[in-house]
Image (cartoon, grey):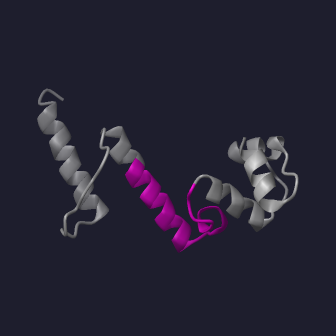
Amino acid sequence: MVAQVVSAALGADIPAQMIEDLRHGRYEDPVDPTVLIAIAEHFQVPGYYLTSDGELADSVAEQLEFLADLRHLGVNALDYRGVRLDRQQVRAILANLTRSDNPGS
């Protein structure tokens, strides 16, 4: 499925095995950045998610970890309503809410 969408977007044949190998970290050849950008766009994330390194990549990884934490806690939506909180503050609030929901843990 991903390979078909990426192939159509690029007008070139992208083998499903390549996508599978990339997914599992087994693809060892250099990958054309346009392929990575097309894969990222398929998953509705910015192309730089798969093509950047350094500080930008660290920022994206932190955002994804934060979203995973929220999902793990069962959060479906979060509205700051004008309040400026950083991720650590939100994590602390959610941890406190989780503890109050499970007083024995």
Left or right? Give the position of 25 relative to 52. Answer: right
Q: How many marks?
A: 0
Left or right? Give the position of 17 relative to 22. Answer: right
Direction right: furthest residue: 13
Front-most of residues 53 and 70: 70
Residue 93 rendering spot, x and y as whole percentages: 18, 52
Direction top: furthest residue: 104
| Quadrant of the drawing holding the N terminus | top right
Query: Does residue 47 lie above or below 103 as drawn?
Result: below
Query: Does residue 65 lie above or below 59 as drawn?
Result: above
Dominant SS of magenta comes to helix
Image point 85% across, 56% down: which residue?
A: 29
Left or right? Give the position of 56 relative to 41. Answer: left
| Residue 49 included in the magenta stretch of the image | yes
Q: Which residues are magenta?
A: 44-67
- Can residue 26 be seen? no
Image point 22% across, 70% down: which residue?
A: 84
Residue 9 rendering spot, x and y as whole percentages: 76, 59
